[in-house]
Structures are given as C-alpha cells and as structure tokens.
Image (cartoon, rainbow, N blue to C red):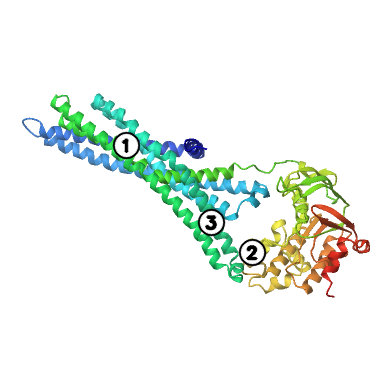
Amino acid sequence: MTLKNKSKKSYASSAASLRRVFFSIGKHKYLLILSAAAACISQGMQLYIPMLFGNAIDAMISQGKVDFALIGSTLTLILALVILSSAAVYLMNLLNNRITYKTAEDLRNKAIRKIHTLPLKYLDGHSTGDIVDRVIADVDQLSDGLLLGFTQFFSGIAAIAMTLIFMFSRNVWITLLVIALTPISFAAAGFITSHTYKMFQKQSALRGKETAYINEMIGSEKTVKAFGYEEQASQKFHEINDDLRECSRKAVFYSSLTNPSTRCINSLIYAAVAAAGALMILNQSLTVGGLSTMLSYASQYTKPFNDISSVISELQNALACADRVFALLDEKEEPMMTSSVNGDIKGAISFEHVSFRYDENKPLIEDFNLNVHAGMRVALVGPTGCGKTTLINLLMRFYHVRSGMIRIDGQDTSTVSAESLRSCFGMVLQDTWLKETTVRENISFGKQDASDKEIIESAKRAHSWSFIQRLPQGLDTVIDEDTLSQGERQLLCITRVMLALPPILILDEATSSIDTRTELKIQKAFDTLMEGRTSFVVAHRLSTIRDADLILVMNHGTIIEQGTHETLIKENGFYKKLYESQFSEA
C-alpha cells in the first residue's frame, strides 16, 4: 500500500470516528444548543468591542475637539460587554464539561454491556489489559480531546461566522481579501493532520499493549520472582516502552507543526490587511479607527484556526482512541435468542455429528457423537489438549459448534437464549472466581434470593462453614485476593453450586486445590449433590472417578474408549495405561 493510500485510509478512519463521536454527543442536543448559544453570545459581545474601540479612536482624533462623553460611555459599555462575555464563556465551559463527561459515561456503559455480550472467542483472543485500556484510558483520552475540541469548536465557529458579518459591515474588499487567503491555512493544517492520525493510532495500540503487559506481570509476580525472570521482564517492558516513547515523540512532533504553520500564514493575512487598509486610508476610503477595527477583526478571524491547530495533537489522539473504542463496540455479539429451555430439565444430553476447531486450519473435534441419559455421571479423561474442556465450552455454549447439534432433553441448545441454557448448569472450575464483596454475596451469586439458613446449610454440606465461622465477620466478611487460601476459595465456589442445585453439574478439577482429607468429605457431598442429576466430571486424578456411570477416554478431540472403570481396565487399553501410570509407584 502506498503512502498516499495509507493517508487516505487513515483520513477515512478519522472522519468515520469523528462522525460517530458527534452522533454519541447528539444525545445531549439540548446541552449542545445551550452551549452553542452561549458561544454565540460571548463571541458577539467580544466582536462588538473592536467596533466600539474604533469609534473611540475616531472620537479622539477628530478635528476640533475630543468627545470625552462618547469615550466615557463607550468604555463603560465595553466593560459591561467584557463581564457579560466572561459569564457566557463560563456557562459554555460548564455545559461542555457536562456534555463531555456524560458522553464518556455513555461510552463506558456501552463498552461494559458489550463485553458481557461478546463471545469468549473475542475475550480469549485479546489480552485483559488491552480491553481494560480501551474502556478506561482510551475513553479518558477521548473525553480530554472532546473537552478541548468543544471549547474551540463552538467558540471558533461562532467567532468565524460573526467576524465575517462584522467585517462585511465595515469594509467589503478587505473582508474578501481575508476570505481569499484563508484556504492556504486550511491546506497546510489538512496536509499535516492527514499524515499524523496513523501515528496516533499506533500510539494508542502500543499503550494498550503496554497496559496488557503490566497487568500480566503484576498478576504473575510470584511466578516471575520464583523463576528469576525479573531482568527479562524489565527488558521486554523497556522495549515496549521505548517503542511507545518513539511513536509518541513522532506523533506529537509532526502534529505540533500545524500550529506554527497556520500562525505563519495567518500573520501573512494580518500583514495583507494592514497593507490594504493603509492604502485605503491614503485614498480616504477608510479611517484610522476603521483600520484598527479591521486589524482586530482579522486577528479575531484567524484566532480560531490558531486555537484549533494548537490542540490538534490532543484531537488526533482523541480520534485514534475513539477508533479503538468503537472497534470494541462494533465487535459481533453472541446471537441473541428469546426462547427458553422447555419445562423442567431432566438432563438427557446428546452430541450429534459435532465438529469444532479454534483455528480454521487446525481440526480439533470432528464428527463427535455422544448420548448421555438423564442422571448419568459422566467422567472425561485424557491427556492435556485432547478436547475435554472444549467439550464443556461447547456444552455451555461459550463457543459455538462449527457443524452438528447439541441437544438437552431433545431441544437444540442453539435455539434457546444463553441465559436460559446456562441456568441449567452449575460449574465448579479449577480456576476460582470470587468478587471483592462479602462471603454471603459470593455464595448467593447464582441464587440472589437465598436466605441465610439456605446459605449456611449449603456451606455445611460443602465443608466450608468451619472456616467461614473463623472469619472476622463470618458471612459479612468482605474478601479479596489475599483473604482466603486457594483451597478456601474453591470451597466457596463449591458452596455456590450446592446452593443453586442446578439440574446438570460440571466439575472441572473441582477439588484440585483441596487437601486429601477434605477432598474425601467433599466427594461425599458431591455424591449426594449428583444423585439424580446429570454430571460431567473432568478429572486428572483417575481415583476420583472410579464410580462414574460412564468414562469417556478422549484423545485428539475424539472418544477412543468408553465404559465403566472395570470394563475399561479389562480392555487393557489407553485408559488402563493412564490409570496404572498414576499408581506405578504403589
């Protein structure tokens, strides 16, 4: 792609982002109208002042006498106009602040709602830090740019339009001269800004990359220290930070050329007005006061161009950030279904010719078939990467099948809403997730209206009640990442499922962080919980799934063996080798 084509593409992207920003702002049209009115009032008063000064000058140099009465009344009027104009500017700034921060609030709310509707494929393909950077830092940069842009935009448009009106009322030829020279300033500013937008896009992307890396390193600091990776981590961060510094330097440097360029051209316009006015004075077609007024108007006319060019880097950065925010908002959402799962779920599940792959060029699950009767306890075993967790993701519709169909009680899961489908499942994963809130709220996450009696009963069944009682405020204790051990966090997640009592259970290494003694107690609780419920158990410790009704041995996305523990041992196949490898020392 040529430099010219790249510039056109960047300009088109910038213009599209600008249109969407104005569309977002348009929701606050009444505030916009008030702000525009305040800008017009302020500029009208400011532009009337040079005319009054011109009249005062002419009153002082008129032949015969100086009209002190006219000068006094003019100065009084000028003072009143300055005060009223300042009040109008203050009001305009207040309104612009409100518009800007309301727009930022709306964009963040949209972004959070969007994240909740995005498929896991998008979230897995983008770092957490980059997504956070779009919602927080990029919206902040956008709001800062909007605030500067609004202040200059409304007052600038009003100043240009009203200045031309006042100039035409004083002298048509000088006004036409100013208008004829204006496109030169536009051309210079347009040329520079069209080439700097891409630099600000790259700057925003690198800032997101840096945020993602910081988030990753802080979250894994124990691992970094354990393996002595500090020097390498610092070096990699230095490389990213150096790229960001260089990109930011170029973006700001080239964008800063706009202001001196436009100022130089505007100074030439000012000089042209002065020269033309001087000739008119000699021809007696213009007074000295009139020239003073026209020079003041010429300065007022070019000032908005200078003001806008002085904040061009912030505006370009804001549009580049807006581009990243809108890219997030434009991501394709999960298909929305309105129908719900029919009636009381018994738990019969079937996979019919299901195919799925994360990468289109790398097959994973091909033509997968499985029938699970209601109430069965199914164990999924196999080597890492064989497709066990992928099968769970498809069952929960975190990912959509490439072809084929998954049914629950005969109903195609792709035809019901994700909320309705997932309400049928209870999950306990190896990776725990708890909110920074009270123990009570964390347990009742899946059943908001649960009473304390129900919560306590569930905690006792999950063997978490003993350590909950030892917490400073019991169920009202606010927990964070350092309050509980990993095992205690997992017990709370198990308690959460115990409380919800869903018809189908998914246990993915649910007791991996729990000591052996407690695990035996939890296993008994699970046995009670799974009674009469369809259950899928992903396990690496094969001793925990010996009592499963059906064991599926998976490899490379397909079922290579299935049956009970005893029958699979007798078959002397892959499962027996896996099982015996865990007890070889014994």
Q: Earlier in the sequence, mark 3 or mark 1?
A: 1
**Of residues 57 and 560, which is closer to you in this image?**
560
Kind of residue sitting beneath label 2: Thr
Kind of residue sitting beneath label 1: Gln
Query: Can you tell which of label 2 and label 3 is closer to the viewer?
Result: 3
172 sits left or right of 326 in the view: left
**Of residues 436 and 130, which is closer to you in this image?**
130
Residue 438, numbered label: 2
Q: Is residue 132 above or below residue 175?
A: below
Image coordinates of residue 8 in percent, x first then y, are 48, 35
Q: Looking at the image, which residue is at 76% across and 70% down?
A: 463
Marks 1 and 2 sit apart, C-alpha to C-alpha, by 56 Å
Which residue is identified by label 1? Answer: 43
Marks 2 and 3 sit apart, C-alpha to C-alpha, by 29 Å
Disc count in the image? 3
Q: Is residue 102 something one can see in this rendering? A: no
Q: Is residue 219 something one can see in this rendering? A: yes
Kind of residue sitting beneath label 3: Thr
Q: Is residue 350 above or below residue 528?
A: above
Image coordinates of residue 387 in percent, x first then y, are 77, 54
Image coordinates of residue 297 in percent, x first then y, are 26, 34
- Farthest-out residue, front: 2
Residue 211, numbered label: 3
